[in-house]
């Protein structure tokens, strides 16, 4: 089975990369973009398991390695 | 007295640390490969800078899982002195041995330059010989040294005197202009509550001899040696 994991910066944590991208977009004349936040996207393939078990496993993986919960939050989507 | 310098894949300041300790300060020093799970026989640990595991995922995120870090954790819990420099600091943050996290520099640029630091407390083994208020000249070299912690953590750090170094101007004033990376409250180095674990972005091992532009870094290692001697090591 497959899962998608999105790791993004928590609200309130400044994102210097996102800010630079925002300003580059405006240099390109792409108007109307108000904010950009840069995050990570991971695709995980895992042994078939009950969705609850898979989620528990990935939650553990996120807390212990895939995300740094001091600055990041994560979202898990199981397919 | 014997000092450990853990070496991870991608460490690149390990030889600088070894040189400063062994040849400049003159203490017995040994490299410890990251697969080793014991620090038996060592009296202090200097985690060097570099780009462990190519900074994959996050700086220090892979290195925190190396067996030697379990040994470092036990060593720190026993009160042993540990200093993490640059990537070594990032590893200590990722390990949870120190609070907070590192962000990309505010400028989005790699900074590599001499900066000034104000020593805030002499309560760590590495700053016992440096009077609070002393201004040190020590270089930084990093892309992710923008220290972040939430407001409650920052307040607790201040209250418990865990801020050890702040970026400052040559007169010792922690101005915005003297902050090379956007770190919260100009923080350049912090210690744990007990004071035996210190993390700092600037590189004292790179400036322990006058011919390298400054010998101020040596003061941290001299302090460590004096601290260990006092303990009969």
Image (tube, coloured by chain):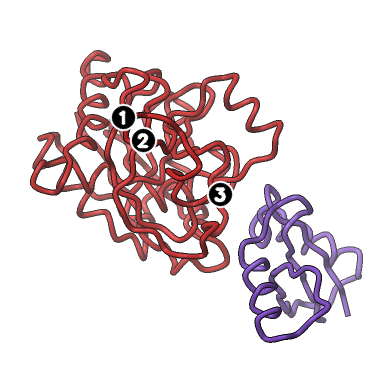
Packing grade of label 1 (10 A; few <14, some 14-19, many >=20) is: many
For the image, the number of numbered tags is 3
Q: Does residue A29 sit above or below B194 in this rendering?
A: below
Name the element at disc 1: strand
> What quarter of the picture does the C terminus of chain B occupy?
top left
- Mark whose residue sits in front, 3 or 1: 1
* C-alpha separation, residue under disc 1 versus residue under disc 2: 5 Å
- Whether the residues at callouts 1 and 2 have beta carbons within 8 Å, the answer is yes
Packing grade of label 2 (10 A; few <14, some 14-19, many >=20) is: many
Parent chain of label 3 = B
> What quarter of the picture does the N terminus of chain B occupy?
top left
Query: To which quarter of the image does residue A61 belong?
Result: bottom right
Residue B143: percent from left, percent from top: 45, 61
Residue B160: percent from left, percent from top: 57, 19
In the rendered image, what is the letter of the chain coloured red?
Answer: B
Q: Same chain for marks 1 and 2? A: yes
* C-alpha separation, residue under disc 3 versus residue under disc 2: 24 Å
Which numbered circle lies on residue B135? 1
The residue at which mark 3 appears reads as: B94
Q: Measuring 39% from the left and 59% from the top, which residue is drawn there?
A: B111
Packing grade of label 3 (10 A; few <14, some 14-19, many >=20) is: many
Q: Same chain for marks 3 and 1? A: yes
- Mark whose residue sits in front, 3 or 2: 2
Q: Measuring 21% from the left and 35% from the top, which residue is drawn there?
A: B216
Say which colour chain A has.
Answer: purple
Mark found first going from the N terminus, 3 or 2:
3
Most foreground residue, B85 or A79: B85
The residue at which mark 2 appears reads as: B117
Query: To which quarter of the image does residue B61 belong?
Result: bottom right
Taking B232 as reference, is B62 left or right? right
Mark found first going from the N terminus, 1 or 2:
2
């Amino acid at each position: 089975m497959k899962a998608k994991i999105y790791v993004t910066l928590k609200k309130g944590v400044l994102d210097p990369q996102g800010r630079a991208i925002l300003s580059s977009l405006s240099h390109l004349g792409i108007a109307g973009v108000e904010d950009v936040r840069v995050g990570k996207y991971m695709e995980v393939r895992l042994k078939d398991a009950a969705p609850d078990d898979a989620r528990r496993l990935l939650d553990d993986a996120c807390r212990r390695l895939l995300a740094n919960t001091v600055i990041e939050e994560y979202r898990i989507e199981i397919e | 007295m014997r000092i450990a310098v853990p070496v991870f894949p991608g460490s690149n300041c390990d030889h600088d640390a070894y040189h400063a300790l062994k040849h400049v300060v003159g203490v017995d020093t040994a490299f410890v490969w990251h697969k080793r799970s014991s620090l038996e026989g060592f009296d202090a640990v200097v985690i060097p800078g570099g780009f462990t595991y190519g900074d994959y995922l996050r700086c220090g995120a892979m290195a925190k899982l190396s067996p030697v870090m379990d040994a470092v954790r036990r060593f720190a819990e026993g009160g042993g002195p540990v200093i993490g420099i640059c990537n070594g600091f990032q590893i200590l943050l990722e390990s949870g041995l120190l609070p907070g996290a590192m962000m990309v520099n505010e400028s989005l640029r790699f900074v590599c330059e001499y900066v000034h630091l104000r020593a805030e407390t002499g309560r760590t083994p590495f700053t016992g010989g440096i009077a609070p208020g002393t201004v040190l000249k020590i270089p930084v070299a990093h892309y992710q040294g923008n220290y972040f912690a939430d407001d409650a953590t920052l307040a607790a750090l201040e209250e418990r005197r865990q801020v050890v170094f702040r970026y400052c101007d040559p007169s010792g004033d922690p101005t915005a202009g003297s902050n090379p990376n956007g770190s919260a409250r100009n923080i350049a180095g912090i210690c744990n509550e007990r004071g035996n674990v210190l993390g700092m972005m600037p590189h004292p091992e790179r400036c322990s001899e006058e011919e390298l532009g400054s010998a101020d870094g040596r003061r941290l290692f001299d302090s460590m040696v004096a601290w260990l001697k006092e303990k009969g090591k």
